[in-house]
Image: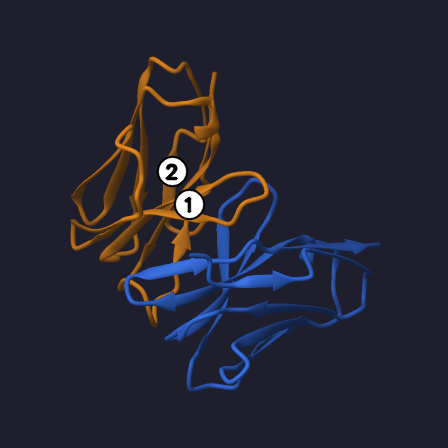
Chain colours: A orange, B blue
């Protein structure tokens, strides 16, 4: 238990569906992140939020829409995804962004787009 | 662009042996971190070494950092079956924590 909880753990969705991934942290951290992990590729940083403000969008397609209503919650809204978007989506949090901060990860959501 | 690159990509050793994994990176960093990931799960932070540090220990883990060579190594001593996992280095720079592709470590009983 890392203090970062992701739901759901598994998700299968069609290309025309709309779904959301949820992440919640109970660590009092100020920064939250979405990462994508595909087979045989490095973890890809998608979005960074610091004190609820988005500070990084790593050229992510608009079919992925993040939302951070407060420092404890982070969502990733999904719509009209492609099969190549199937991956493990990991949420993480840290006390500060970037340097001097270790990240705490959730268990991930295994997404399959059919 | 990708920062850390681990070497080797896969490593298989006998239980009780030591395992060494290396990480190289390309640009200046504030710190370097190592993480472990069990299959299909989230990453767990192992150790952080700052750019002005050369070596750090945590239990059976020893991490070294050579900023002149832009490289780091993770040594796991007296390996156990439970150490079987993927190990990633991550470099901290500005807002980002950028991960390498990982080393898949298998400990054989």
| Quarter of the figure that contains the C terminus of chain B | bottom right
Labelled disc at residue A6: 2
Q: What element carries label 1?
A: loop
How far across and down, in percent of the image, does residue B38 sit? 60, 48
Depth check, front residue: B53 or A10: B53
Chain ID of residue with mark 1 = A
User: Measuring 59% from the left and 43% from the top, which residue is drawn there?
Assistant: A40
User: Measuring 49% from the left and 82% from the top, which residue is drawn there?
Assistant: B67
- Crowdedness near tag 2: few (<14), some (14–19) or many (≥20) residues, C-alpha within 10 Å: many
Q: Is residue B76 above or below residue A42?
A: below
> Which quadrant holds residue B55?
bottom right
Q: Is residue A64 left or right of residue B106?
A: left
Tags 2 and 1 touching, CB below 8 Å: yes
Labelled disc at residue A62: none
Label 2 vs 1, first from the N-terminus: 2
Q: Is mark 2 on a helix, strand or loop?
A: strand
How far across and down, in percent of the image, does residue A44 sit? 42, 47
User: Measuring 74% from the left and 61% from the top, which residue is drawn there?
Assistant: B80
User: Measuring 45% from the left and 31% from the top, which residue is drawn there?
Assistant: A9
Instruction: Read off the residue under disc 1.
Output: A106
How far across and down, in percent of the image, does residue B24 sit? 56, 69
C-alpha span from label 2 to label 1: 6 Å
């Amino acid at each position: 238990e890392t203090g970062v909880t992701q739901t759901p753990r598994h998700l299968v969705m069609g290309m025309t569906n709309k779904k959301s991934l949820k992440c919640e942290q109970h660590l009092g951290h100020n920064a939250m992140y979405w990462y994508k992990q595909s087979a045989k590729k490095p973890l890809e940083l998608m979005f960074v939020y610091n004190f609820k403000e988005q500070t990084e969008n790593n050229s992510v397609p608009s079919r992925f829409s993040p939302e951070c209503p407060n420092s404890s919650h982070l969502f990733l809204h999904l719509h009209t995804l492609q099969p190549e978007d199937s991956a493990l989506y990991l949420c993480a949090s840290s006390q500060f962004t970037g340097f001097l901060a270790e990240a705490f990860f959730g268990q991930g959501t295994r997404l399959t787009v059919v | 662009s990708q920062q850390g690159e681990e070497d080797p990509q896969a490593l298989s050793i006998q239980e009780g042996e030591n395992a060494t994994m290396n990480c190289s990176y390309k640009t200046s960093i504030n710190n370097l971190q190592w993480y472990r990931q069990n299959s299909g799960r989230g990453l767990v932070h192992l150790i952080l070494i700052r750019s002005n540090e050369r070596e750090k220990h945590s239990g059976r883990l020893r991490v070294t950092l050579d900023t002149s060579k832009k490289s780091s190594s993770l040594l796991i001593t007296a390996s156990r079956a439970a150490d079987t996992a993927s190990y990633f280095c991550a470099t901290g720079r500005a807002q980002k924590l950028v991960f390498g592709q990982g080393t898949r470590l298998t400990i054989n009983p």
